[in-house]
Every structure is written in C-alpha cells, then in structure tokens.
Amino acid sequence: PDELSILSKKFDAVTRDMTQSLLRSARAGIINVVRDFSSSITLFDGRQFMIDEGIPTHLMNIQYVPEYTVKHFDDISPGDCFLTNSPYAGNSHHADYTLHAPVFYDGEPLFWVINKAHQADVGAPEPTTYLADAESIYEEGTHFPSVRIQEAYDDKEDIVRMCKTNIRLGEEQWYGDYRAQISAVRTGEEELRELCDEYGVSKIQQFCEEWLAYGERMMRKEIADLPAETVSYTAHHDPIQGAPDGVPVNVTVLVEPDEERLTVDVTD
C-alpha cells in the first residue's frame, strides 16, 4: 500500500512536469494563457494510466491516439515522436496537435508520453481553427493521421517544413509551440526512465497493473451504490448555418448497479 501511494504521486509529478515544461515555453496565448492543453501517460498498449489536470474532452479518450499509432507502425523505436491531429486517427478536433513519444527501457516499450495542445492556427482557409460552416475536412487545414515527426530524437525536416509553410506564423509561432510540446514529451520520457532506474522495471510494471486494478475496483464500488435508472439529456452545439438554434446533441446514460456498469450512448 505505501508503494502504491508513493509511486502514484511520482507518476502524477511526471505529468505535472510535462505540463510546466509546455506552459513555460509555449508562444501562443491559447496555450500559455488559456491553458488549452493536456498531458498524460498511457501504457504502451494504449491503456489510460496517468493524466494531469487537463481538459476532459482531451483526456477521456486519449488511448485512441497511441492505439492508432501502434496499429499503423511496426518499427516504433526509441527517439521517435509522432504527430496526430486528425479526429479520424483517434484525436479530438484537428486543431489539437497531439505529440506522443514511446518510452523504452532496456529495449522494452513501456509507456507513451502524450501532450495535446490547441494550436492558434492550423492552416485553414480562414485564420481560425474552427470553421463551423466547413463542408468537408479539406476545408479545415491539414490532417496528420499519426506521422513520425521525430526519429532518433531529430526532427523530420520535411514534416516540419510542411507545417511551417501551411500554417500562418509557422516559423514565428507554430514552430515555437511545437518545440514546447517536444520539450514536454521528452521531459516525461526522461523522468519515467529515472523511475525505472530507481525502482526497477519489474516493480514499475507491477505497480502499473495494480494501479489500474485499484481504479477499476473504486469505480465499480461507486457504480454499485448508484440507483438503477436511465438518464437522458440534450445539449446544443453552437448555432451554424442550417441550425440557428444549434445542433442537438443527445446523450443517454444507463446505470446498472448490479452489473457495476455505466453505458453512455452518444449515437444520436
């Protein structure tokens, strides 16, 4: 129990150091003032593991990003870093540039360190990251469905040059924010390796499984104490052309305490 508590705080500190690294070096106000970013750690297979005090819509499905990358690359190596911004590759909206790097120890892949940050510009036809009346992804700016943007800790200059060319203030602002995100994931990578040095990789792996099992037990207990019911709610997206009152977004939650399960249906 004592090691479970201590190690959980140490991993939490890693995500906070990632956040501070980005916060202190990013150029765009959307990042360093508004704090529209999130930091997290997943296991190498993608399972959510540790998150900072980020944005729920960034983190609730963060596992889809590394899962997509693992599926599409069979040569992931130390020193790699990948860029994903496409909703069709596990990301949130395309303005959230998600950098994620694998963490290896003694040649074994253990974790992904992930930093997601809303960029001030992504090269859309208008100087904005939200084109509410866009009729296709081709009007939104470039989509990167997980591309290797660093190899052996060096930038893939063709990808970086593409971004600088297609994004407004690509050299002056975007590149600085990109380097700040790189700093965040490399900070996390270094500190996770230090934890493996300190505790040994077998202890760290044991902790990871125990921590996830502990979280599941706690959640199951909370659900078991809820009343059995079905709850529906409707919110509205921002008004757009053709839907002046906003697009309705309907959610239904089924609570099954006997099954210790919540089912959230966002189909409609």
Image (cartoon, helix red, strand yellow):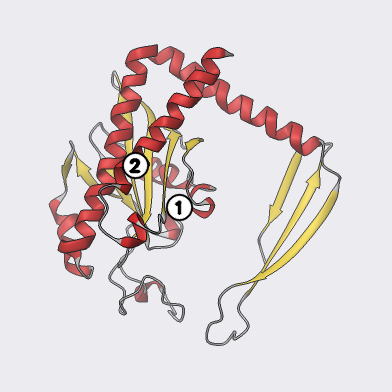
Would you place residue 99 above or below residue 165 in this image?
Answer: above
Cα distance, mark 1 to mark 2? 25 Å
Q: Residue at x 31, y 31 (%)?
A: 189
Would you place residue 141 above or below residue 62 in this image?
Answer: below
Disc 1 residue type (three-letter): Gly
Q: Which mark is residue 24?
A: none
Give the residue number, with chain letter if any, for mark 2. 20
Disc 2 residue type (three-letter): Gln
Q: Secondary structure at mark 1?
A: loop
Q: State which mark lies toward you, 1 or 2.
A: 2
Task: Tell me where residue 253 appears, x and y as whole percent.
Answer: 75, 54
Task: Tell me where residue 55 appears, x and y as whole percent.
Answer: 49, 52
Q: Answer few, some or many: residues within 10 Å of disc 1's Cα (few below 14, many 20 plus, some between 14 and 19).
A: many
Q: Residue at x 33, y 55 (%)?
A: 32
Q: Residue at x 81, y 43 (%)?
A: 256
Give the residue number, with chain letter if any, for mark 1. 90
